Amino acid sequence: MKTQRTIERSVRGMKTSDGAGVKLTRVIGTPVLRRVDPFLMLDEFRSDEPTDYLAGFPDHPHRGFETITYMIAGRFRHKDNHGHEGLLETGGAQWMTAGRGIVHSEMPEQKEGLVAGFQLWLNLPRKDKMCEPGYRDVQAGEIPKADLGGGAEAGVLAGRVGDVVGPIAGRETDPLYVDLVLPAGSAGVVPIPKGHAAFLYPFEGDVVVGEDRTLARGELGILTDGEEVRVAAKSGAARVLLVAGKPLNEPVVQYGPFVMSTTEEVEQAIADFQAGRF
Ligand code: FE
C-alpha cells in the first residue's frame, strides 16, 4: 500500500498585472504564499478580453532560474537576445533556462479570442545559476499522455507517470509537471516521488483529493508528503495542474526577475544586466 498524499494547506491567488499590463492571477509568489521550494512563482492567465493581454511582456531580463510556460489556449511568441525564437500554441509549452542571463519578450500573437495558460518559475541550484541559457519549445503533440483509467489521463511535460516519460528531464530538482484531464465521474492516481514538494491547481471544475478533501477551481492545494495522490472530478469534468519538485533548501534572494543566493549576487546581476552582459 503506497502512502497517500492529501491537502496540507490551500490558498487562492491574487489578481495582479505584470509585463506591460497583462492581467493575471498570481498563485505562488504572493504575500500569503511566497514560494513552494523549488518553485518561486506560478501565474495563471486567462482572458478573452484582448485589453487584458495585448500589451504582452516586452523585453525583460531573467537570471538564476527557469521559466515554464504552458498554453491552455492561444498563441504567444517568444524571442530572446541569444537568437532563440518560438511560437507557443495551444497545448504547447516552453521551457526556458535563464541561467546566467537572458533578455526576452513574450508577446501574444493574436488580437482576439481566449488566451489562457500558466507560467511557473523553477529555481536552479546555486551551482547551476550561472549556466548557459537554454531554451526548449515543446509542441502539444510532443507531450505524451498517460492513461489513468476510466477516461482520466495525464499529459506529462516533465517527469514520469508510470511508463510515460515527459520530454523535459535532467534537472537536479527532478520536476514533475502534469496536466490531469478528468472527465465527469473519473479519478486518477498519480505517483509523486517521496520528499518532493507538490501542489495541485484545478483550473476547470472542482476536484476531490484523497478520501474527501474538496479543492475548488482556482484554489492551490499544497500536498502532504507521500508516494501518490488520488484526484477525482467532483461533479462535472475537471482539469488540474499537478506540479512537484525536489526542494533545494538553499537561500533565495530575489529581486524581481533576478533570483540568486546572496544579496551580492543580485547586485552583480543588476550590474551585469545594466552593462549589457546578458
Ligand atoms: Fe519572461
Image (tube, grey):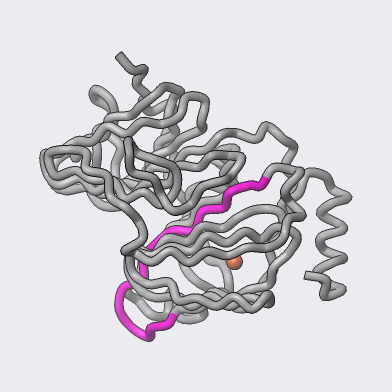
Q: In which quarter of the image is residue 92?
A: bottom left
Locate ligand 1 by image quadrant: bottom right
Q: Does the magenta stretch include residue 117?
A: yes
Q: Residue at x 24, y 25 (%)?
A: 212
**Image quadrant for the N terminus?**
top left
The residues colored magenta run 109-124
Instruction: Spot the residue most to the bottom.
Output: 111
**Which quadrant of the rendered structure holds the C terminus?**
bottom right
Can the viewer see residue 45 in this picture? no
Q: Is residue 254 left or right of residue 116?
A: right
Q: Going by the image, does 210 lie left or right of 235?
A: right
Q: How many marks?
A: 0
Residue 66 is situated, as x and y percent measured from the top left of the image, at 60, 55
Residue beneath the point at 30% across and 78% down: 113
- Is residue 165 shown above or below 84? above
Task: Answer above or below: position of 196 versus 59.
Answer: above
Above or below, 219 against 101 in this view is: above
At a point 37% along the width and 46% down the height, the residue shown is 178
Q: Is residue 66 left or right of residue 119?
A: right
Residue displayed at 63% across by 63% down:
134
Asked if residue 69 is positioned above or below residue 39 in the image, the reply reads below
Q: Where is residue 40 in the image (x, y as percent from the top left)?
A: 59, 47
Whether residue 53 is in magenta: the answer is no
Q: Is any atom of residue 228 visible in this view?
A: yes
* Closer to us: 22 or 68: 68
Direction front: furthest residue? 163
Q: Where is residue 110 in the image (x, y as percent from the top left)?
A: 38, 83
The residue positioned farthest toward the top in the image shown? 1
